[in-house]
Amino acid sequence: MKSFVLPLILVMASSNLFAAGNVSSFLKSLEKLDGQEGRVSSNTNERGTGECQIEILKDTQSTSIYFRNTGYYFTPVAHAFSDSAELVDANTLLVSEDSNRPGGDACGSYGGESGYKKTITLNGGSVTIRETFRCFLFKKYDFSFTCKL
């Protein structure tokens, strides 16, 4: 039995180190985009300038990406915390599964949010910030903002 457990522990530990390395690599790729400009698009009714500029802010615990100069009512943003971000696939980083914020959750002060996910996707010459969730299990929301460089 002991001969089976030790290899299993080693495989699990190495896969965690590999995933952490991939998250770090993803974030480094993201950081290289700082200051680049492009065209913004969204699946919402937001009307803006049609332009975007990538701004990356980094500290010891997180890397944040902002789409600046979009002219939208709000700034598309995502924060990737080094201890909780995880890769969904080679191009997509899951940055949050928690929509709690002052005044309630993503569904407002009444609550009822379920299935919340916020991701950052790097796909060739574009970056997408996407938020998906349901309110009260009925209405599904899917907000996507893409800056094509």
Image (tube, rainbow, N blue to C red):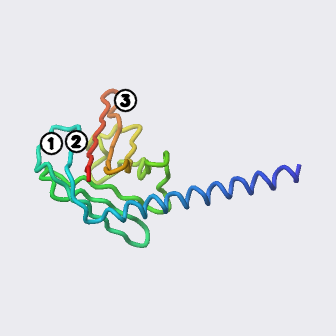
Q: CA distance from mark 2 to mark 3?
A: 24 Å
Callout 1 environment at 10 Å: few (<14), some (14 to 19), or many (20+)?
few
Q: Position of residue 103 (x, y in %)?
A: 26, 50
Which image quadrant is residue 81 in? bottom left
Residue located beneath label 3 in the image? 137
- Dots 2, 3 in contact, CB < 8 A: no
Residue located beneath label 2 in the image? 42
20 versus 41 height, above or below: below
- Dots 2, 1 in contact, CB < 8 A: yes
SS at mark 3 in the image? loop
Q: Residue at x 48, y 57 (%)?
A: 84
Residue located beneath label 1 in the image? 46
> Tag 3 or tag 1, which sits nearer the N-term?
1
Q: Position of residue 18 (x, y in %)?
A: 60, 57
The amino acid at mark 3 is Leu
> Tag 3 or tag 2, which sits nearer the N-term?
2
